[in-house]
Amino acid sequence: MGERSGGRHRSVVVAEELAARLQAAGIGAETEHRHIDRPVLT
C-alpha cells in the first residue's frame, strides 16, 4: 500500500485495497464513499 493516501484517511485506502484484492480473488466486494462530496483536508 505504501504512502498513497493522497490526503484521505488510511481507513479509506485500506478499504479500497481490500476490496480490490477480494475482487481479484473472485470475491464480490465494493466500497461506498458516503462523504465523497466533502473537501479533502491537506
Image (tube, rainbow, N blue to C red):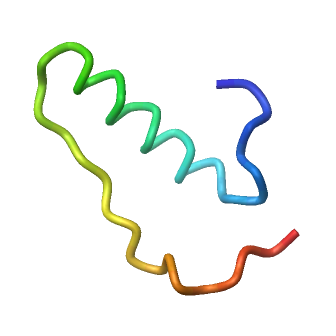
Q: Is residue 24 left or right of residue 21?
A: left
Q: Is residue 33 left or right of residue 10?
A: left
Residue that sits furthest to the right in the current view: 42
Q: Is residue 35 above or below residue 16?
A: below
Residue that sits furthest to the bottom in the current view: 38
Q: Position of residue 4 (x, y in %)?
A: 74, 38
**Which residue is rendered at x = 64% and y = 48% of the image?**
10
| Res. 2 image quadrant | top right
Q: Is residue 17 left or right of residue 7?
A: left
Q: Is residue 11 left or right of residue 21?
A: right
**Which residue is rendered at x = 69% and y = 83% of the image?**
39
Q: Nearer the viewer, residue 11 or 26?
A: 26
| Res. 3 image quadrant | top right
Q: Position of residue 41 (x, y in %)?
A: 80, 75
**Which residue is rendered at x = 73% and y = 74% of the image?**
40
Q: Is residue 21 above or below residue 28?
A: above
Q: Position of residue 32 (x, y in %)?
A: 31, 63
**What is the quadrant of the N terminus in the image?**
top right
**Which residue is rendered at x = 53% and y = 53% of the image?**
12
Q: Is residue 13 above or below residue 1?
A: below
Q: Position of residue 30 (x, y in %)?
A: 24, 47
Q: Is residue 11 above or below residue 38?
A: above
**What is the quadrant of the C terminus in the image?**
bottom right
Residue that sits furthest to the top in the current view: 25
**Count of numbered circles on the image:** 0
